[in-house]
């Protein structure tokens, strides 16, 4: 496999072509951004941790019947992924109220609800990722109703698989954001972005301590150390 040209540069990752038209290389950067790119910082070692955590989670999903873009790990910060056509939607799953959802619903952060809440957002920086519903997504031509049903079902399945996995690691999966794409080889809709402490809220079950990007958002310090805790604990439960 030969690494080709840079085809995408985001805030937190780069994507390179390969000599296989259906595969790309994801490179995780040490940069982190929040609040629609308003807040930005660099944490040495974070890219490598996101790469490893995401590899464990995506591989676990692949092995449990949920297709993701993850193929294999290539190096400290790089993984080989299936090439996809981006679907600019974010499916956000909430198991407990946190972040902006608390203000939106007028309840305390940490409120436990009995059901799983699934939100849909239009992935559009200019519009600041607005909340939309299925009708808006179809109106914009982003997906069909059938595809949206599929994405919601996959998101719930991912939650049903990852919640107990994190629980084994003494971590509560509070919420997470999932993105999808159409695989260039088969056309099927697969998970197409990282799943990591950058895209989930993860609370230590014993102490309630935040082990995710909120440490950066809320200036809580020990960002990299917390991501390392997540990786170390996941490694123990996976092996
Ligand atoms: P969400 O409730 O959509 O927004 P907020 O971060 O304002 O509370 O976020 C739920 C989870 O999804 C949280 O863990 C952060 C993650 N997320 C992303 O990773 N990227 C995004 O662009 C958005 C909107 C959320």
Image (tube, rainbow, N blue to C red):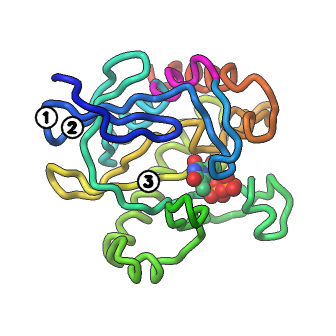
Q: Is mark 1 within 8 Å of ligand 1?
A: no
Q: Quadrant of residue 96?
A: bottom right
Rendered residue at 66%/39% (across/down): 202
Residue 54 at what x, y percent from top left?
Answer: 46, 33
Q: Which mark is residue 179?
A: 3
Rounded to the nearest angstrom, the CA distance separating label 3 from label 2 is 18 Å
Residue at image point 13% right, 34% down: 20
Q: Which is nearer the N-term, disc 1 or disc 3? A: 1
Compared with residue 4, is residue 217 higher up or lower down, i.e. above or below? below
Instruction: State yes or no: residue 184 in magenta.
Output: no
Say which of 130 and 74 sits in front.
Answer: 130
Q: Residue 184, image x and y in percent?
A: 19, 51
The mark tally for this picture is 3
- Disc 1 secondary structure class: loop
In space, the residues marked 2 and 1 are separated at their CA atoms by 5 Å
Magenta stretch prevailing secondary structure: helix
The magenta segment is 43-51
The answer for how far apart the CA atoms under marks 1 and 3 are is: 23 Å
Which image quadrant: the N terminus? top left
Does residue 128 appear to the left or right of 57 in the view shown?
Answer: right
Disc 2 marks which residue?
23
Verify CB contact (< 8 Å) between mark 1 and mark 3: no
Within the image, what quadrant is residue 92 found in?
bottom right
Q: Which residue is mark 1?
A: 20
């Amino acid at each position: 496999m030969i690494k080709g040209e840079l085809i995408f540069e985001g805030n937190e990752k780069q994507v390179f072509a390969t000599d296989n038209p259906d595969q790309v290389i994801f490179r995780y950067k040490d940069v982190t951004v929040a609040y629609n790119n308003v807040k930005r910082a660099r944490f040495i070692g974070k890219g490598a941790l996101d790469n490893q955590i995401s590899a464990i989670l995506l591989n676990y999903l692949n092995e449990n019947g949920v297709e993701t873009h993850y193929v294999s790990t290539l190096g400290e910060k790089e993984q080989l992924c299936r090439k996809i056509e981006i679907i600019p939607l974010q499916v956000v799953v909430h198991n407990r109220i946190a972040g902006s959802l608390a203000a939106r619903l007028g309840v305390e952060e940490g409120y436990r609800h009995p059901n799983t809440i699934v939100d849909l957002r239009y992935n559009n920086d200019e519009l600041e990722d607005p909340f939309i519903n299925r009708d808006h997504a179809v109106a914009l031509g982003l997906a069909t109703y059938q595809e949206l049903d599929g994405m919601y079902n996959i998101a719930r399945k991912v939650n049903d698989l990852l919640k107990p996995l994190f629980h084994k690691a003494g971590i509560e999966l509070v919420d997470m954001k999932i993105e999808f794409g159409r695989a260039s080889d088969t056309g099927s809709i697969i998970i197409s972005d990282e799943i990591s402490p950058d895209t989930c809220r993860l609370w230590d079950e014993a102490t309630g301590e935040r082990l995710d990007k909120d440490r950066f958002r809320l200036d809580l310090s020990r960002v990299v150390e917390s991501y390392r805790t997540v990786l170390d604990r996941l490694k123990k439960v996976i092996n």
